[in-house]
Image (spheres, rainbow, N blue to C red):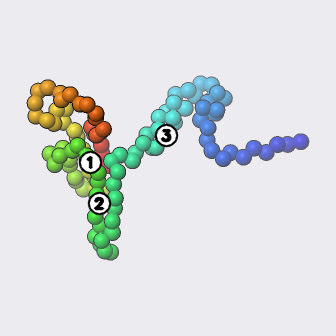
Amino acid sequence: MTKTLTLRSIDIPQIAKFGIGFDNMFDELLRVNAQQSNNNYPPYNIVQINENEYMISVAVAGFGHDNLTVIKEKNFLVIEGNHALNSVGTDTEPTYLHKGISERNFRR
């Protein structure tokens, strides 16, 4: 009697136990998978105005005009945000009661 198995999804931790000597490759696959599933920052909208015009809205709370760069590289529009270490303008870090705005840099 032959049993046929169907692969419906890749379960890397289960496959890794059969791949002795391939530990680095499986670690790299897990790292790449984690990066790909986390590429939705910052959120954005693209609206088609007409056949040749589009409007892009990017939600970049906590960034000022001096922290954002918008450039065109070949056929790509690149929006980059670099958050200054201390954007308040003082030498001391403010005391936050709640900090809900992310300050991570991005390139999209």
Q: Is residue 74 visible?
A: no
Q: How many marks?
A: 3
The mark found on residue 60 in the picture is 1
Q: Secondary structure at mark 2?
A: strand
**Residue occupying image coordinates x 27% and y 37%:** 103
Q: Calculate the distance from the C-alpha at mark 2 to the C-alpha at mark 1.
A: 12 Å
How many residues crowd mark 2 within 10 Å: few (<14), some (14–19), many (20+)? Answer: few
Check disc 3 and report the residue beneath it.
33
Whole-percent x and y of residue 40?
A: 39, 47
Residue found 72% across the figure and 46% down from its top? 6
> Could you tell me residue 58's position as x and y percent?
29, 54
Residue 56 is marked as 2
Q: Nearer the viewer, mark 2 or mark 1?
A: 1
At a point 28% along the width and 64% down the height, the residue shown is 55
| Secondary structure state at the residue bearing disc 3 | helix
Q: Amino acid at mark 3?
A: Asn
In the displayed orientation, state which residue is furthest to the left: 90
Tag 3 or tag 1, which sits nearer the N-term?
Answer: 3
Q: Find the residue positioned furthest to the front.
A: 97
Q: Nearer the viewer, residue 42 or 97?
A: 97
- Of circles 2 and 3, which is in front? 2
Q: Say which of 23 and 96 sits in front.
A: 96
Q: Residue 11 at x, y = what percent?
A: 61, 38
- Residue type at mark 1? Val
Please tell me which residue is depicted at 16% across the width and 36% down the height of the picture: 87
Label 2 vs 3, first from the N-terminus: 3
- 40 above or below 76? above
Answer with left or right where residue 69 lies relative to residue 19: left
Element class at badge 1: loop
Residue mark closest to the camera, 1 vs 3: 1
Q: Amino acid at mark 2?
A: Ile
